[in-house]
Image (cartoon, rainbow, N blue to C red):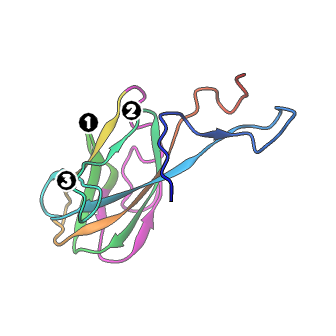
Amino acid sequence: MAVSTTQSIWRSGGGDQTRAAYCGSGVMAATFYIPAAGTAGNVQASATDTSTVVLPAGAVVTQVIINDLGTGTIDLGYTGSANGLLNDAAVTAISSVAPGDTGAGATMGTILNATSNVTVTNAVGGTAGTGTVGGVIIYYVTDPYNGQQNV
């Protein structure tokens, strides 16, 4: 399968030839893995890929899915906010956390940083987690044209 990478903000008018449709932002998924939930530090891409997880400027996280379980709680944050994405989120069951849910951080659902990339980090939660924790971060990048056609 071919792999393609772009630095563009994905938008789609849905094939509307009249250019009247609102262009929506593409939703993306970034896997994450925490090898030791009770140890603060950068989050890596997977159990076998130790690359840090970096989200682009303008990213808005709409959901964090936990599918690799540990014990206790974690704080999932990013550069400048230790628990902005998850704040004392339980990692003892497969779960999905969205803005406003128990365990959601204060900046989930908002622009993380409008001008700079952010590195995803793990901090020790209120009941320090143990074991490995992994999952998927669902996000989109804000649209500078607010859905309007631009050409």
Dot placed on the residue nearer the N-terminal end, 1 or 3: 1
Tell me the chief SS of the magenta region. Answer: loop
Residue range corresponding to the magenta coloring: 87-115
Image coordinates for residue 111, horizontal then vertical, percent: 45, 36
The amino acid marked with disc number 2 is: Asn
Check if mark 2's residue and mark 1's residue have beta carbons within 8 Å.
yes
Which sits in the foreground, 60 or 30?
A: 30
Q: Is residue 114 left or right of residue 125?
A: right
Whether residue 119 is situated above or below residue 151 in the rendered picture? below
Circle 2 — which element? loop
Image coordinates for residue 115, horizontal then vertical, percent: 40, 25
Q: Is residue 119 left or right of residue 140?
A: left
Circle 3 — which element? strand
- Quick one: quadrant of the C terminus? top right
Which sits in the foreground, 145 or 3?
A: 3
Q: Which residue is mark 1?
A: 80
Crowd class of label 1 (few under 14; some 14 to 19; many from 20; radius 10 Å): few
Whether residue 104 is situated above or below residue 146 in the rendered picture? below
Circle 1 — which element? loop
Based on the displayed image, in which of its 4 quarters is residue 125 positioned? bottom left
Q: Residue at x 64, y 26 (%)?
A: 145
Query: Disc count in the image?
Result: 3
The amino acid marked with disc number 1 is: Gly
Can you see residue 83? no
Can you see residue 107? yes
Which sits in the foreground, 8 or 63?
A: 8
Between marks 3 and 2, how big is the CA–CA gap? Answer: 19 Å
Residue 113: assigned label: 2
Q: Residue at x 19, y 61 (%)?
A: 126
Which sits in the foreground, 45 or 117?
A: 45
Residue 123: assigned label: 3
Based on the displayed image, in which of its 4 quarters is residue 103 positioned? bottom left
